[in-house]
Amino acid sequence: MTGEDLRYFSTFAQTGSLASAAKKLGVDHATVARRIASLEASVNLRLMDCRPRSCVLTEDGHQIALVGERVNAAACSLQRYSSAGQDAAEGDLAVAAPPAFTGAFIAPHVRSLRKTHPLLRLSLLETKSVFRLTGMKQTLPSAFPEDDSASKSFNGAWFSRHQAAVA
């Protein structure tokens, strides 16, 4: 059994189909099926039941999927632990936001940000303008959950570990 086989199976279990898992993993659906077959052979269990138009998890498949989730969570935890303090933010960070948002949500955290990341050069721009995000060098999603209404009305605060630009 390999970690990759388990990762492919876990992705299948999360998405519910070979095609969706393949799309998420950036591979062909046959590759996902082959990895799952390899995992099934190595654990000597049938993990999914394939029907003409779909594949469903068996009871063993559900149990292995739970194990896969725990393994993935442990791997993510290990990654966070091993990289803590090693990824120093450095460079220019430009943040443009409406004045009320800047004052209420960003400005109170500037001192802490500068203490934590002394090599980061922060520029705050209070603006009511709406920015087009095309032409940006790098972007990361907003710090808001996708369903938060504030994220829908907030335009312009896009952060990057090394450099951010607002077009």
Image: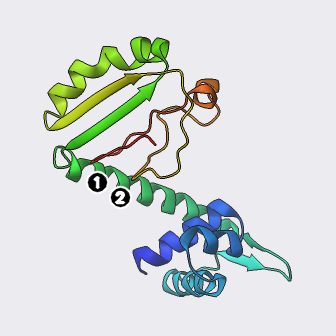
Instruction: Please say whether residue 89 is visible from this viewpoint.
Output: no
Real-space Cα separation, disc 2 to disc 1, in angstroms: 5 Å
Question: In screen coordinates, is 17 left or right of 112?
Answer: right
Residue depicted at x 44% and y 46%:
140
Q: Give the quarter of the image for residue 106.
A: top left
Instruction: Please say whether residue 43 is visible from this viewpoint.
Output: yes
Residue 4: give x, y in percent of width and height: 44, 76
Numbered badge on residue 143:
none
Q: Nearer the viewer, residue 72 or 1?
A: 72
Residue depicted at x 42% and y 40%:
166
Mark 2 and mark 1 residues within 8 Å of each other at the beta carbon: yes
Which amino acid type is shown beneath numbered disc 2?
A: Ala
Residue 103: give x, y in percent of width and height: 40, 12
Q: Nearer the viewer, residue 141 or 83?
A: 141
Q: Residues within 10 Å of mark 1 (few under 14, many from 20)?
A: few
Which amino acid type is shown beneath numbered disc 1?
A: Leu
Question: Where the N terminus falls, by quadrant?
Answer: bottom left
Give above or below for 19 relative to 119.
Answer: below
Question: In screen coordinates, is 92 left or right of 125?
Answer: left
As helix, strand or loop, the secondary structure at mark 1 comes to helix
Residue depicted at x 51% and y 80%:
43
Residue 36: give x, y in percent of width and height: 58, 80
Which residue is denoted by mark 2 in the rendering?
Answer: 75
Q: Residues within 10 Å of mark 2 (few under 14, many from 20)?
A: few
Residue 29: give x, y in percent of width and height: 65, 82
Residue depicted at x 39% and y 53%:
137
Which residue is denoted by mark 1 in the rendering?
Answer: 78
Q: Nearer the viewer, residue 163 or 117?
A: 163
Question: In screen coordinates, is 130 left or right of 118?
Answer: right
